[in-house]
Amino acid sequence: MKAPRFAYARPASVAETLALLARYRGDARLLAGGQSLVPMLNFRVAAPKVLVDLNRVAGLSGITVAADRVRIGAMTRHAELERSPEIARHLPLLAEALPHVAHPAVRNRGTIGGSCALADPAAELPACALALGATFVVAGRRGDRRTPAAEFFTGLYSTALDPEELLVAVEFPLPRPGYASALGELARRHGDYAIVGVATHALVRDAALHDARIVFFGVEDKPVRAAKLERALEGRPVGAIDAALGELDADLAPRADLHASAQTKRHLAKVLARRVLAKLQGAAA
């Protein structure tokens, strides 16, 4: 199929972009890397009146390390993050996740902002943002606002973004000493969306877990923290994971899909949690 007819705009600034969004009032779609949007257009899942190309908007890309955070511009490509020594040093969870994001051709064009704004429930980067306590910087006609990741993802392909707002950056707090991260996913083949995935971040001290953030993706309609499992593991050795895994039955409400039933996803979530939490302890050693 071919995409429906649409107008095309290529703004050069955030202000110009916001003016276009206000003018079209929900009938505009933003083009970042286009790796998800272009197929949606061709299948006519999306039919905007105007396509707003962000690729010439100044100030939307780049990685900046400050005293307490890493700021990543929304138009920063996956490939740039994958190659970045700053990301490898300060945000190893992102560095571990990026090779799982599709394939090199997709990572060369796809952006962190596009991935998070799309909010695919099986995507890696939204789960990492939630596990690391990221904040999303959003520009609107009334100025910028900041939304924590826990409030940003609201449902299936749904976020707290207003149709007339633009995601401009994602800010990650610098991990404190003693914290470690680990990620794992199960997919039909490397590069496919995860059937089940988990991103973890925790303080590992004296072989015990503290302040754990355990986030599953590919299970429900958005990335979800396993709060009961986190509480069950607080202050306990990683070896106690088997005794705590039963809490996932209350934490997760899996959705069946083409690849697995809800029961299978629940089982795979437990298998993957055991593997990744053991890897978390090793990452902190």
Image (tube, grey):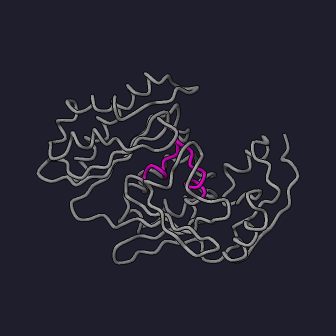
Which quadrant, please, contains the N terminus?
Answer: top right
> In the image, 178: left or right of 67?
left
Residue 241: image location, x then y, percent: 22, 35
Label the magenta part by its dominant secondary structure: helix
Picture quarter containing residue 31?
A: bottom right
Residue 121 lies in the magenta stretch: yes
Residue 126: image location, x then y, percent: 49, 51
Who is closer to the viewer here, 139 or 268?
139
Span shown in magenta: 114-128
Q: Residue at x 57, y 42 (%)?
A: 156
Picture quarter containing residue 44?
A: top right
Q: Residue at x 21, y 39 (%)?
A: 232
Q: Tell me if residue 188 comes above or below residue 232 in the rendering.
A: above
Q: Residue at x 44, y 50 (%)?
A: 97
Q: Residue at x 17, y 37 (%)?
A: 239
> In the image, 90: left or right of 281?
right
Picture quarter containing residue 227?
A: top left
What residue occupies the far front of the structure in this picture?
142
Residue 244: image location, x then y, percent: 22, 33
Residue 74 lies in the magenta stretch: no
Who is closer to the viewer here, 81 or 249?
249
> In the image, 252: left or right of 107?
left
